[in-house]
Image: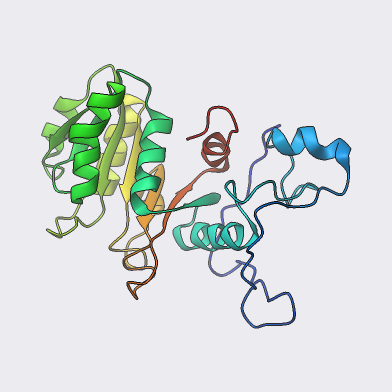
Amino acid sequence: MKHRNPVETLANARHEFGEHGGVNMSIEASTTFTVMHSDTMPEIFGGKKGPDQGGCYLYGRHFNPTVYTLGKQLAALEGTEAAYCTASGMSAISATLMQLCDAGDHIVSSNAIYGGSYALMHDLLPAKTGITTSLVDITDLAAVEAAITERTRVIYTESMANPTLRIADIPRLSKIAKRHGIKLVVDNTFTPLILSPKKLGADIVVHSMTKYINGASDHIAGDICADADFIQQLMDLHTGM
């Protein structure tokens, strides 16, 4: 059962209070959760019933109330239907690319990106999965389009490159992606309150929350902001990355 979520905005995002009246939401430490009605279990495992659809939380690795609420706030920040939080920025990027690509598929990526992202696409993915990447000057739109093949599934860029600060022309990259029927993935780590890649035409927005969103160098985390269908694909118990 597919359902269309409204696009979140910061203006209408619900504020969750703590369990005992705290101004901030309580931190949920439980790994497992109680199902009150056993006949809802098949729908919960099938992704048809979550905490907002008459079901409940499933397992801490999937998500818990703390992470779920954070995801809704991040979706509101980026203006997407949904968001999913991960253990790091690299886990968000890896999960997104591997969900979009199968063995033998191809990515066109900016060559001015975070070193971990570069290593993932240049070294790890080709060796382990057969997914290859053409790394190009993302500001050269002709080079971007020329690099696209029949196996290309993704154009990947950072809105503002880490650390060179090169700026991607997201609206024009979006037009190229749509013309070829592929997805535009934008890492918005450096500019979450300056640029809105989704509004500019990106299909999926990722962050390393370790940096600008956290801002205190004391937590490692990542997130994926996208439409509800893609987030559900990521969370599929059998094929989700």
Picture colour scheme: rainbow
Q: How many marks?
A: 0
**Which residue is pictured at 58% across the width and 38% down the height?**
232
Horizontal side of 226 relative to 159 (left or right) equals: right
Instruction: State the image coordinates of residue 39 (x, y, percent, origin top left).
Output: 87, 36
Query: Can see residue 130?
Result: yes
Q: Where on the picture, by quarter, is residue 166?
A: bottom left
Instruction: State the image coordinates of residue 1 (x, y, percent, origin top left).
Output: 71, 31
Instruction: State the image coordinates of residue 231 (x, y, percent, origin top left).
Output: 53, 41
**Which residue is pictured at 53% across the width and 67% down the height?**
10
Depth check: give the residue in front, 181 or 136.
136
Horizontal side of 224 relative to 20 (left or right) equals: left
Q: Where on the picture, by quarter, is residue 30?
A: bottom right
Horizontal side of 39 relative to 233 (left or right) equals: right
**Which residue is pictured at 87% across the width and 39% down the height?**
38
Instruction: State the image coordinates of residue 218 (x, y, percent, origin top left).
Output: 37, 72
Question: Measured along the vertical axis of the image, is residue 147 above or below residue 224?
Answer: above
Question: Measured along the vertical axis of the image, is residue 91 above or below residue 216?
Answer: above
Horizontal side of 106 relative to 228 (left or right) equals: left
**Which residue is pictured at 76% across the width and 35% down the height?**
43
Question: Measured along the vertical axis of the image, is residue 204 above or below residue 9?
Answer: above
Depth check: give the residue in front, 74 or 210.
210
Query: Can see residue 48?
Result: no
Depth check: give the residue in front, 173 or 30.
30
